[in-house]
Amino acid sequence: MWYDEIGLLKPAVIKENGYRYYTYQQSYLLEIILMLRELGVSIPEIRGFLENRTVMSLKKLFAEKISAIEETIRHLQAVQKTMEKKHQDMDILSNLDLSEIQIVERAEPRYLGIVDVSQAKSMEEEMDLAVAGAKKYHLHRLYDTSYGSMLSIENMNKGNFNSYTALYLELPEQERDKALHVQPAGKYLRAFCKGDGEQLAIRYREIMAYAEERGITFYDFSYEQGLNEIVLDSLDNYITLIEIPVKF
């Protein structure tokens, strides 16, 4: 009835009892309309196709929708990967030993989009920059990816634990050619910290003492990531994952 009302598919006959009757050819046309609607084709697009129904026009319409579907699939795959990562984070949190410092292996590099915060900025300004960065790299929203902070080894060694170089956004596979930084694969020192910047400074000193005792050399950057922002009730309970590439 709606398609009749908007003139998209009018019945061949409307009898006195109000019943609408359609021809066999119209039933086939209805199937085409329903298929196009399922593909997300708008009513104006369908109307345009019906007014110019040719092999080439249908081929062009299909090509456009196939491209859109492929983009949706890529987005959903990226969201799935992010959700799997957050699920792993929750698993880590449920079995977390905050005192532990360990050496772990990162099997694959990460491709990162960079948001420069080398100049002092407020937390609100940094979050605005991160949101803008997400749009720049075609992420639908900030929480579609893993993100965090990068602290240079130079600043860490100097004790400038709050002098961050950049915020990072992990890029999905289809955006990796835009990466401004590649976090290397290899061995990492991994530790956790609960609390604010003051507690983070204490934890870094513990990390540096641990490394010095074992002849461990740091390189590249220290990568920080908040693990419990989704369930956070107080900054005192904020848990930061710290990962730093190491050499022996």
Image (cartoon, rainbow, N blue to C red):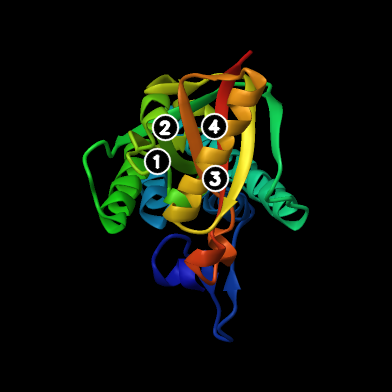
Indicate the position of residue 91 as horizontal and vertical percent values: 75, 52
Q: Quick one: label 3 or label 2, which is nearer the N terminus?
A: 2
Q: Is residue 38 above or below residue 233?
A: above
Q: Position of residue 11 (x, y in %)?
A: 52, 66
| Callout 2 secondary element | helix
Q: On the image, which quarter does residue 114 sit in? A: top left
Q: Nearer the viewer, mark 2 or mark 4?
A: 4
Q: Which residue is mark 1?
A: 161
Q: Are marks 2 and 1 in contact (CB under 8 Å)?
A: yes
Q: To which residue does mark 2 refer?
A: 156
- What SS does tag 1 mark? loop
Rendered residue at 26%/36% (across/down): 118
| Label 3 packing within 10 angstroms: few (<14), some (14-19), many (20+) | some
Q: CA distance from mark 1 to mark 4?
A: 12 Å
- Residue 206 placement, left or right of 137: right
Does any portion of residue 83 appear in the rendered image? yes
Q: Are marks 3 and 2 in contact (CB under 8 Å)?
A: no
Asked whether, in this view, residue 79 is left or right of residue 43, the answer is: right
The quadrant the C terminus occupies is top right
Q: Nearer the viewer, residue 242 or 58?
A: 242
Residue at horizontal 53 percent and vertical 69 percent from the top: 13
The mark that comes first in sequence, 4 or 3, is 3
Could you classify mark 1 by the number of other residues whose Cα lies within 10 Å: few (under 14), some (14-19), or many (20 or more)?
Answer: many
User: Residue 233, relative to residue 132: is it above or below?
Assistant: below
Q: Evaluate if marks 1 and 4 touch, with contact meaning CB atoms under 8 Å apart.
A: no
Residue 11, visible in the rendered structure: no
Residue assigned mark 3 = 203
